[in-house]
Every structure is written in C-alpha cells, then in structure tokens.
Image (cartoon, rainbow, N blue to C red):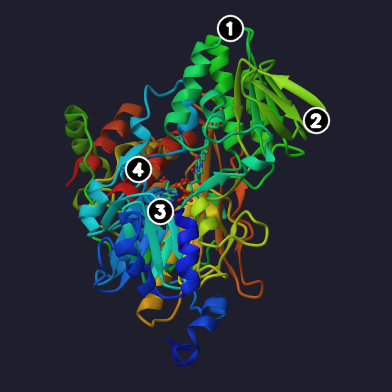
Amino acid sequence: MRIKGIQWALSAAVLAMSASAFAAPPTPAMLSNACAGCHGTHGESAGPSMPALAGQSKVAIVESMKGFKSGERPATVMGRLAKGYSDAEFEAMGEFFSKQKPFTTSQTLDRAKVAKGAELHEKNCARCHVENGKEIKDNSPVMAGQWVKYLEIQMADYHSGKRKMFDRKAEKMKPLSQSDLDAIAHFYASVK
Amino acid sequence: MTIDRRSFLKMTAGAGAAGVLYGCASTGPSGSTAEVMPKTGRRVVVVGGGYGGTIAAKYIRMMDKSIEVVLVERNDHFVSCPFSNLYIGGLMKDLSPLTIRYDKLVANHGIKFLQAEVTGVDAASQTVITSKGALKYDRLVLSPGVDFRTEEVKGYNLATTPDVIPHAWKAGPQTVLLRKQLEAMPAGGNVVLTIPLAPFRCPPGPYERTSMIAMFLKQHKPKSKIIVLDANPDIVSKKGLFLKGWKKHYEGIIDYRPAKKVTEVDAASKTVLIEGLEDVKGAVVNLIPPQRAGQIAVAAGVVGSDKKWCPVNPTTFESTIHKGIHVIGDACIAGAMPKSGYSANSEAKACATNIVNLMNGKELVDFSGINTCYSFLSAKEAVEVTGVYKVDKAKNAIIAVPGSVGVSPDLSELEAVYAESWLKNILTEMST
Ligand SMILES: Cc1cc2nc3c(=O)[nH]c(=O)nc-3n(C[C@H](O)[C@H](O)[C@H](O)COP(=O)(O)OP(=O)(O)OC[C@H]3O[C@@H](n4cnc5c(N)ncnc54)[C@H](O)[C@@H]3O)c2cc1C
C-alpha cells in the first residue's frame, strides 16, 4: 500500500520492465499458496500422507515450522523448506491456514481400531487433546479428521524417540504398544 | 486455397489492426480467424492445460471472479510426466493414475475451456489464433511446456522418428510406446538412453528413468544393460544419490557415459551417433532431444536471444519482449528455479496473483515459490531435491533462498510414501 501512489503514476511499460523493484513483500497468500502443491489448495490435502493444513491452529503451524527449521522435529523435505522462511513468515502462513475452513478428509478407517482408539484417547490423551482432537489447547494441533497415514508416521516418530516430547506426553505415550498407537491414529482420523 | 496461419498472422500484424483480422476472417480460407467466444468483459486466455496452465486459470478465478478465463488446450485430458518413469519401469498397470480431465476444474471455477490447437499469437492486436477460431485477450498466459530442437540431431524427423525411437519426454502415447518396446525387447539386448545438454525439462528425470529402466531389466531381461549417453559432463542432478542407488540395486546393469553428445540418429538401424566419432546401437533407443520453449512461444515471438527460452519479469512473469503476454512453466526463464512441475505450479500462482493485481490497478506482490522434485530409485525408495525461491531485488531475478536447497540424505522409503502423496495432491490441485 505504501507505494501505491508512485505505482499509479508509472506507465505500464515501466511497470512491466521493473515490476519487482516496486512490488510488496510476499503476502500470506503468496507464501502459503506455494505449500498447496503438496498440501492441497488452501491446505485441503487430498492425502494420504500429506497432512491437511486448512483450519489448523496457527500456533501449531508456527511451532512445527520452527521445529523443522532448528532440526528438532524430524522431517524429509520440511527441514530444508523451513530454512527458506523467517519467523514472521511462519506467522503469516500459520495465520493463513488457520483461517481456512476446516477440511474433512474422506478415508477408509478400521472400525474396531477407531473404537479401541476412542477408549485409549479418553484414558491417555483427552486432557490435552480436548474435544476429541478438534479443539486446540496450548500448542497442541488439531488432529480431528487428519489423514491417518500422517498421524501414524508422527506416532512412530514419537515412539521411536526421533521426535521429542514433553515429559507428561512421554509418560502417557511410552507404555502404549504399536497397535495402541495405530488405534489412536484411526480414532483421531475418524472424528468429524 | 490455403494459407499458412503464421504468415497470415504476420500479414495481419503488419497491417497492425485487429479489425483487419475480422475483416479477413469473413472472407478468409478457414473459420480459424473468425472470433470464437467473443469477449465481453475482461479476459485472460491461458494456453496449455498442464502443470502451469491449469493452476494459473484456477487461481485467477479464485482471486477475481469478474475476470473471464479461457483455457485453451489441444487435448481433452492431460497425462503427467511426473511418475511416468514408474509406469515405464513396470510399477503401474496403465497411465490412469497420471491422467486428469478438465471437467471438474472448469465447473468448480467457472473457467471456459476450449479444446483447440493454438497456432499463433498477435501481441499487437491481443489476439490468439486457434484451430477453432480467434480469441481476444487482455492478458495472455503461455504455459506450453517444451518442444524439441530436432535440428540439432541430424536425421531426426519429428513426424516419424519418435514412432521408432521414442522420446517419452511428453507423457502419453510416447510413454506407452517406450514401455512396449522394453517388454518386446529380447533378453540380453541393450537399451540406449540419451540425455541432451542442460537445461531441459526435469533435471533429475533422465536419471530416474535410467533407474526405472534398470529395475525393469533386472527383473525381466537377464543380461540386458542400459547404456546412458549423457551430453553433460556429469550427472546433472542428485548425483550422489543416483550413484548410490545404482550401486545398491543395479550394479553391472547401468553403463553411464558422460560427455557423449548425440548429434545424429538413424532410426532404421536404431543407431545414434556421437559427434561423428562413435556410433551406438540399441535394441531399444530412448533419445531425449534437446529442448526449447513450446513452439507457440516461438510463434508469439517471446523466445529470447538464446533462441530457446522466454525471458520474463520475475514478479509478474510477463514477457520482457511483448507486453501482455506472460510465460510460465518450462518455457520461461525463472532464474534459479528448475524446470519442474512443482516450479510451474508455484510460478502459475504468482503469475495469477499479479495478473489480477495488474488488472485491478493494485500493488504487485513479490514472488515466493517452492520446488520439490521426487525421483524413484527402486520400487520402494525415492529421493528428492527441494528449495524455496524468492526475488532478489538487486539482481531482479528469482534466486534460491540460501539454506533451503538440498537433497535427501539417503534413499528413503518414507520419501516414496510422501512422493505418492505429492502426486495425488498436485494432480488434485490441477483438476478440481
Ligand atoms: C520423465 C519426466 C519426469 C518428471 N518428473 C517430475 C517430477 O517428479 N516432479 C516435477 O515437479 N516435475 C517433473 N517433471 C517435469 C514436469 O513434467 C514439467 O516441468 C511440467 O510439466 C511443466 O509444466 P508446463 O505447464 O510448463 O508444461 P506441461 O505440463 O507440459 O503443459 C503444457 C500443456 O500445453 C499444451 N500445449 C502446448 N502447446 C499448445 C498449443 N499450441 N495449443 C494448445 N495446447 C498446447 C500441451 O498439450 C500440454 O497439455 C518430469 C518431466 C519428465 C519428462
């Protein structure tokens, strides 16, 4: 907006030749649209392992990006991609995706696992992952309706110690078996 | 009487008025210069329904419904090059997972689709000539991909050579032909794959193809080899990872020969010649010709002095040669960005954003884009190269953000899982 006046005064020809000199820094949409090549338009991932970002908590996105950048959170591409952005840009992208309308995935889930996962969630996770993972508390992410394959990969990273967790979370998660974690992933994925 | 459309265009461009176009059209040789879909409001015409064009059309409409968008594409469907090497290697039954149609995209966003061949562009009168008629535009986006510099390979006839010696560098029937030839080949026969000098579409693509063909040979053609004749002095992309994968899986199957530039081909004997010095014969020959921007970019006069690619403004992707014509994807020079589908996707969004800004007299926004390009080394392992790209104001060019560019640390099954999800997402973006 700052330089709009000047820009108006420029002829189209000058604009075409040196537009970048007069352009504003990337907007939240410009930054975030590029993510859609993997995460889907507006963060509505078509799955099966790329997480949907539409309607995700801003804090969770910013924290994830910071974790990717520092290397604290294990990653494939995200560790390098996060190095391409500033903290202010993480905030902008977090804001953009958190404002998109939440997206419900449609995937085939195992009913028995969902039922077992619901119980395990009640017992172990519900204190922090409130409203069945639909709502956010502190910096916990929205997990309801997320792609199950993505949740499974995250659970595996926690369980193997590749991804660090708070003591409170570790206390709850460590004793769970692989099939328990599987069930919990199916449960969160099932929540509409 | 017939008249070559390009010379017709030159005539009308020389006459310098749009009115001349219509005047001629009424008495002209074919309906192709009569206006099809007369323009009412503000209009952007997008040429090419591939990785760049679909996204440009969609994002313009998502950002401003008052702009009419006409997407012109020669086919009624699009087959993705990404993952086509997996089909060639036998990992896919058919090309359906790589094929998209336009019906949902067009309906969801109110895009007008014209299935036609674009044969000419007249920048002065802001008119595109198609096999179905002329289209007026306020702004034009070209995302035609690549065509081949066949004149640099003696004996290469674009009309006949690919039927015998497939390039399979545009996915579809060519991809199917290459796989059929591999299947029909006698065990013990050699495959010859030739790589042109960079830059070409998809820097790691030829080496992924080498891996997938080697995988096929290992399984189905005992004693067969793949001889790779690379015009470049070395492997162009992800070198360490490809060498590692080749050693791990295909020892003795891949014969990689750098600095071997194919300059001549004899289709009848399936022989390629290297700068008059050497000839190499194969049971199957996959010659990837050197490339330039799609022919329509040449016809539109937006190809630069290198006679290969289109110089563009790094913020708007507007041609630095002709105003009002934007070029994205493989055809353009996007600074440090490689010629990939993901790059085309990012470029399309930035181009769409700034076309909408330009048409509404709004402030332009700097480019920020991503490239992630996966390659498969075996049925289950993939690697990637990735990076974030922004505009360097001082250089007025797109550069890689330091620290963001790099490759996978190792071959990885997890990367293969994410790769499949990438394909699903990007094709969904393009088709819905
Ligand atoms: C084997 C292989 C593997 C690859 N793997 C990857 C990968 O894993 N990841 C990645 O990101 N990229 C990959 N690529 C690169 C990717 O395919 C291209 O970079 C991408 O397609 C470029 O998009 P584009 O819009 O410029 O061209 P395209 O996607 O080719 O689209 C061009 C469209 O324009 C149409 N067209 C052209 N001229 C006309 C005309 N005159 N009239 C009407 N229609 C016209 C064509 O029919 C086509 O549909 C790969 C490429 C190859 C060959």
Q: Secondary structure at mark 4?
A: loop
- Measuring 55% from the left and 83% from the top, which residue is drawn there? A14
Q: Are marks 1 and 4 on the same chain?
A: yes
Q: Chain of mark 3?
A: B
Discs 3, 4 touching: Cβ within 8 Å = no
Q: What amino acid is at disc 3?
A: Val
Q: Secondary structure at mark 2?
A: loop
In-image side of B319 versus B403 (left or right)? left
Question: Which sits earlier in the primary sequence, circle 3 or circle 1?
Answer: 3
Looking at the image, which is closer to me, B365 or A154? B365
Looking at the image, which is closer to me, A77 or B92? B92
- Rendered location of residue A147, percent (x, y): 30, 41
Q: Are marks 3 and 2 on the same chain?
A: yes
Question: Which sits earlier in the primary sequence, circle 1 or circle 4?
Answer: 4
Residue B185 quadrant: top right
Discs 2, 4 touching: Cβ within 8 Å = no
Q: Secondary structure at mark 3?
A: strand
List the residue tagged with mark 4: B75
Q: CA distance from mark 3 to mark 4?
A: 11 Å
List the residue tagged with mark 1: B187
- Measuring 64% from the left and 60% from the top, which residue is drawn there? B402
Q: Chain of mark 4?
A: B
Q: CA distance from mark 1 to mark 4?
A: 36 Å
Residue B266 quadrant: top right
Answer yes or no: disc 4 within 8 Å of ligand 1. yes
List the residue tagged with mark 3: B118
Looking at the image, which is closer to me, B48 or A176? B48
Residue B42 quadrant: bottom left
In-image side of A111 versus B302 (left or right)? left
- Measuring 35% from the left and 43% from the top, which residue is drawn there? B75
